[in-house]
């Protein structure tokens, strides 16, 4: 028994003094990253291509070697027509990490609005190719109703527990299960100070959560539904918050209400949601999955369409808060 | 298994029943209970030894024993002994055709550890089929270093084959299986989330516990529902003689126990509440953990021969609750808790038969309340209602037949926000009906066998292949008195799973759901063999080798990005290893050494990897020394070779979309993102830690006081917990942590 103790006492200090070096890094993995979001609200489409990089240490923000490249050929295929993107550079607004202009690709005069499959191919030097596919969705009509009755005017003051509904639909044979909607409703108003009017937007939340104060919850991405209901009390609170703490209500002029609807493809919606999802503060992960729909590399190829609707606001409704109307 | 293949099994059980019935009709049986004379509490695993025959048995977790196959019309001296108690001998005449009841009360000895049991003096049933079974009494744990305070799950981690991922969780992993494959039973009731404060401590207060039975694998047919292990926590009945109370305080919790007699029974109430998060901060690198938790236990039992002879009725309830409330609307809050209720009727009949009927209900609720943070909401609720009946019959030849059935109704609700913010309910409800039969061959002195069959007649999710057979077998052959070979084999199933992401190093709670119909229930096959060697009365060596295959593991689909993707995907696993444990007991010293060599693999989507709890070598050394006059010093040293982790393989500029409705600039919104290497191919540095404890027990009149001074991580080893990938910051586990416990008992 004594021998066992002696061996233990001899071995334990050896183990205690063992080197505990750990290398958090493996061999560098070379990847190409392609990002392209096709938008219907512009005729200029952009794409970026970059390569992975490594840094000394663990802080990737210390990287100063610009990973963006444009020595490749990028082709968009839409409705059986191939569009070749041009390489270009764009001045950076943030030059804290990379000093030079951003290398990228652009395609002018391309504004797809019809529902169809769309493909993206990148041909890199050395024969490497990246590929992705998605769908372009058509624009949607937006409707508003107050307590179930169609309405063109934005009001809620006279409603008791009223609901204002915003609904939308898509055209053609589009598969609604693949489309995702991101609605935004904002009150456009001006505030006059010293005879100078400045324009502002007040986003209307989906609801307010009552804690010590009222906290807004915005709609985010809506799936499985083609409508958004907002309680009249939420709208009234948003209207009140425009001039919160300001006794000079008449210096506010309510212009109108703008409803914007983004119709995202599944890839863009998933990418966005995956990015927005992070673990609660107490959970720690040893492995973090990353969304990509680029075959042969990383990144995102997505599309979105856009529709906006300007709604007239009921003057009596605006005045009931003490505000002016145009 | 086709029904026809069951015929041999049925014939087998008919045969053994008949042969046992005709065997040794002229033999007698002595049975009874062994209890503590000071409080009437059952003494589990006490030695019962027939002097004249040089054989014996031990009590079970209830303190119940049966000595069968005794020559009738003979007088025997039966010796009852238990660690810390004065040995008692009684002379018993074994009558013909009658079962002799002998109930014994043992008095605690004045100097507890002077009567410490020597291995050679501990009566071991030579043919006991107890491979992979650890029977632990609370007394076994009390003198070891406790850390902040005694914790039954942390104590299990010193056993060979039981792995942990570090100081920061009492979650345990048995023989290469995930922690959700461990069944935790409080008496017979499932506790779904038996952890407090992010898993740092167990929710079961040791003061309410009498003993633990821990099967590391190949468990017998009366248990089911988990792929890996079973921990059965047997609670105390309460002081049947006098009203007594106990209070203790540590740096973490304050707790109290009140117990006492009632007419024909006893009760116990135990409660624990944390009062400071200072210690919890130490577990989180001094980050705040606004945790608030409590647990409560109440049990009452009633046994009145005038009302019902040889019957015992027990009612118990348990509740635990945890909250982490940030009191900040832009931060998430957490709530989780368990509740259980159980009614048990235990009856001993005139023949050597006992049976019990139990009705119980258990509930777990867990909630992540995101408030206005970006956390996703989670709501999990599990409710079960169980009715079970079990019986055990001891034949004259010592063989035992037991069986039972269970009706288990379960409702689960899991509201989970997926990557798109879409809320899904993965919950369902179902009824599981199962039955088991188990036959233990104990008639041969050197050979014992335990064969059983557990049958799942329905699947919780309904539909699918409803009937599932889980045969189990365990054998023991003792070559010489000092050396026994043991082996066991079994198929185990699991139909209730957690949607737990095994990549989460620290997780709030693991939500439970019924395995959905699109997956088969998980199953595993265990092959275990071992040697038990007792070369002297002071020394024992146990070795076990195991091989375990797991299939249809329901794993979280980490790459579920689209609505058509399944939430869970099937995986498979494999684990094998070798365990070694030796113990030297020679008053005043008690030394235990354990070593585990193990491998564990998982495979999902064609990718095979080592799970993050796979440690190749684990060593646990512990010793306690009685210095006399109430002073006890103990030490425990743990070593574990590095756990797997995934390395960084580079970075890339990831397109960042802060707000999809105002998204406009593809050209500016980029942030670096980490590219990971092959999963878990690299290992963290080795883990090791030394804990010391000094205990002083003082008795003044009826007042018993105990003061423990504990120091965790004495040499302040900087054990690596993880490396923050975004900063490269090294996050270590617990630094040196002294603590004091004070316990007062009246």
Image: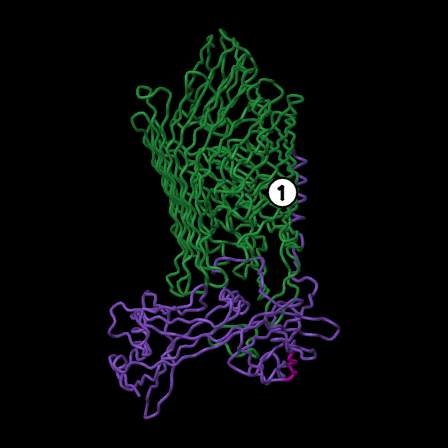
Chain colours: A purple, B green
Q: In the figure, residue B675 lies in which quadrant?
A: bottom right
Q: Which residues are magenta?
A: A82-88
Q: In the figure, residue B489 lies in which quadrant?
A: top right
In the rendered image, is residue B627 in sight?
Answer: no
Q: Residue furthest right?
A: A126
Vertical relation: A39 (above or below) B565: below
From the viewer's side, name the closer residue of B639 and B391.
B391
Residue of label 1: B619
Vertical relation: A57 (above or below) B703: below
From the viewer's side, name the closer residue of A108 and B91.
A108
Residue A228 image position (x, y, % from top left): 38, 69
**Quadrant (top left, top right, bottom left, bottom right) of the N terminus of chain A:** top right
Residue B440 image position (x, y, % from top left): 55, 23
The chain identifier of the residue carrying mark 1 reads B
- Name the residue rendered at 38%, 28% in the picture: B345
From the viewer's side, name the closer residue of B379 and A137.
A137
- Please indicate whether residue A323 sits to the left or right of residue A166 in the image: left
Instruction: Give SS at disc 1.
Output: strand
Is residue A83 located in the magenta-colored stretch of the structure? yes
Vertical relation: B451 (above or below) B616: above
Q: Residues within 10 Å of mark 1 (few under 14, many from 20)?
A: many
Q: Residue furthest bottom?
A: A195
- Please indicate whether residue B111 sits to the left or right of residue A24 in the image: left
- Please indicate whether residue A278 sits to the left or right of residue B360 in the image: right
Is residue B59 located in the magenta-colored stretch of the structure? no
């Amino acid at each position: 028994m004594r021998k066992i103790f002696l061996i233990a006492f001899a071995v334990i200090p050896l183990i205690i003094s063992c080197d505990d070096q750990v290398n958090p890094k493996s061999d560098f993995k070379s990847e190409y990253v392609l990002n392209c979001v096709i938008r219907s609200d512009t005729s200029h489409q952009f794409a970026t291509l970059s390569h992975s990089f490594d840094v000394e240490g663990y802080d990737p923000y210390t990287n100063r070697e610009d990973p963006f490249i444009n020595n490749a050929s990028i082709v968009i295929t839409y409705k059986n027509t191939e569009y070749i993107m041009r390489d270009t550079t764009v001045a950076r607004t943030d030059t804290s990490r990379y000093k030079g202009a951003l290398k990228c690709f652009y395609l002018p005069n391309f504004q797809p609005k019809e529902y169809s499959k769309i493909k993206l191919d990148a041909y890199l030097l050395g024969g490497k190719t990246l590929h992705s596919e998605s769908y372009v969705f058509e624009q949607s009509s937006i409707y508003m109703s107050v307590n179930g009755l169609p309405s063109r005017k934005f009001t809620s003051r006279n409603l008791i527990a009223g609901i204002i509904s915003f609904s939308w639909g898509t055209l053609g044979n589009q598969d609604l299960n693949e489309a995702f909607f991101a609605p935004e409703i904002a009150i456009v108003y001006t505030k006059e100070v010293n005879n100078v009017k400045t324009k502002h937007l007040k986003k209307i939340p989906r609801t307010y959560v009552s804690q010590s104060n009222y906290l807004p919850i915005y709609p985010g991405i809506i799936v499985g539904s083609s409508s958004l209901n907002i309680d009249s009390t939420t709208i009234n609170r948003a209207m009140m918050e425009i001039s919160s703490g300001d006794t000079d209500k008449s210096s506010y002029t309510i212009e109108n209400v703008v409803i914007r609807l983004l119709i995202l493809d599944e890839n863009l919606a998933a990418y966005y949601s995956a990015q927005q999802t992070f673990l609660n503060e107490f959970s720690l992960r040893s492995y973090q999955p990353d969304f990509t729909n680029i075959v042969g590399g990383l990144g995102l190829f997505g599309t979105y369409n856009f529709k906006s609707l300007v709604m007239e606001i009921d003057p009596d409704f605006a005045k009931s808060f003490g505000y002016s109307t145009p | 298994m086709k029904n026809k293949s069951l015929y041999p099994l049925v014939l087998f059980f008919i045969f053994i029943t008949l042969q046992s019935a005709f065997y040794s009709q002229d033999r007698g049986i002595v049975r009874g209970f062994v209890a503590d004379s000071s409080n009437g509490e059952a003494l589990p695993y006490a030695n019962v030894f027939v002097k004249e025959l040089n054989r014996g048995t031990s009590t079970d977790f209830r303190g119940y024993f049966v000595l069968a196959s005794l020559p009738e019309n003979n007088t025997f001296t039966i010796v009852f002994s238990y660690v810390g108690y004065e040995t008692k001998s009684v002379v018993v005449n074994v009558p013909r055709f009658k079962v002799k009841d002998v109930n014994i009360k043992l008095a605690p000895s004045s100097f507890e550890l002077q009567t410490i049991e020597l291995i050679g003096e501990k009566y071991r049933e030579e043919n006991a089929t107890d491979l992979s079974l650890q029977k632990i009494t609370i007394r076994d744990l009390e003198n070891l270093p406790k850390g902040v305070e005694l914790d039954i799950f942390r104590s299990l981690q010193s056993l060979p084959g039981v792995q942990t991922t570090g100081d920061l969780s009492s979650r345990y992993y048995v023989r290469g299986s995930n922690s959700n494959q461990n069944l935790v039973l409080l008496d017979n009731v499932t506790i779904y989330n038996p952890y407090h404060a992010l898993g740092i401590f167990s929710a079961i207060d040791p003061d309410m516990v009498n003993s633990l039975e821990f099967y590391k694998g190949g468990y017998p047919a009366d248990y089911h529902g988990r792929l890996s292990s079973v921990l059965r926590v047997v609670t105390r009945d309460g002081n049947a003689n006098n009203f007594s109370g106990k209070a203790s305080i540590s740096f973490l919790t304050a707790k109290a126990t009140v117990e006492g007699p009632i007419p024909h029974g006893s009760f116990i109430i135990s409660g624990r509440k944390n009062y400071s998060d200072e210690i919890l901060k130490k577990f989180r690198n001094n980050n705040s953990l606004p945790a608030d938790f409590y647990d409560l236990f109440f049990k009452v039992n009633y046994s009145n021969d005038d009302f019902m002879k040889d019957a015992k009725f027990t009612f118990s309830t348990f509740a635990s609750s945890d909250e982490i409330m940030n009191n900040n609307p832009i931060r998430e809050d957490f709530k989780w808790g368990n509740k259980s209720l159980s009614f048990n009727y235990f009856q001993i009949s005139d023949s050597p038969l006992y049976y019990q009927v139990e009705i119980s209900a258990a509930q777990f609720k867990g909630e992540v309340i995101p408030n206005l943070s970006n956390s996703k909401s989670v709501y999990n609720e599990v409710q079960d209602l169980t009715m079970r009946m079990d019986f055990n019959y001891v034949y004259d030849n010592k063989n035992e037949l037991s069986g039972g059935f269970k009706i288990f109704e379960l409702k689960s609700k899991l509201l989970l926000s997926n990557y798109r913010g879409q809320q899904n309910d993965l919950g369902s409800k179902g009824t599981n009906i199962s039955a088991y039969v188990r036959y233990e061959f104990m008639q041969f002195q050197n050979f014992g066998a335990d064969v059983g069959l557990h049958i799942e007649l329905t699947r919780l999710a309904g539909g699918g292949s409803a009937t599932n057979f889980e045969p189990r077998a365990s054998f023991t052959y003792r070559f010489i008195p000092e050396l026994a070979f043991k082996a066991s084999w079994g198929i185990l199933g699991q139909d209730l799973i957690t949607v737990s992401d095994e990549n989460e190093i620290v997780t709030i709670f693991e939500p439970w759901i019924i395995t959905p119909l699109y997956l088969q229930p998980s199953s595993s096959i265990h092959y275990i063999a071992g040697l038990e060697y007792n070369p002297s009365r002071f020394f024992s060596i146990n070795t076990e080798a195991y091989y375990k295959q797991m299939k249809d593991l329901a794993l979280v689909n980490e790459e579920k990005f689209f609505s058509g993707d399944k939430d869970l995907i099937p995986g498979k696993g494999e684990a094998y290893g070798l365990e070694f444990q030796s113990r030297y007991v020679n008053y005043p010293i008690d030394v235990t050494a354990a070593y585990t060599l193990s491998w564990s693999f998982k495979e999902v989507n064609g990718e095979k990897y080592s799970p993050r709890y796979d440690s190749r070598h684990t060593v646990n050394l512990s010793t306690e020394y009685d210095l006399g006059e109430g002073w006890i010093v103990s030490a425990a040293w743990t070593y574990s070779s590095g756990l797997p982790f995934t390395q960084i393989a580079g970075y890339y500029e990831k397109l960042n979309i802060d707000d999809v409705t105002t998204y406009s600039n593809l050209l500016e919104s980029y942030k670096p993102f980490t590219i990971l290497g092959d999963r878990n191919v690299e290992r963290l540095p080795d883990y090791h830690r030394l804990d010391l404890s000094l205990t002083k027990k003082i008795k003044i009149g009826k007042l018993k006081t105990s003061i423990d001074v504990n120091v965790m991580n004495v040499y302040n080893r900087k054990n690596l917990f993880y490396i923050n990938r975004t900063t490269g910051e090294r996050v270590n586990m617990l630094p040196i942590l002294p603590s004091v416990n004070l316990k007062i008992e009246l």
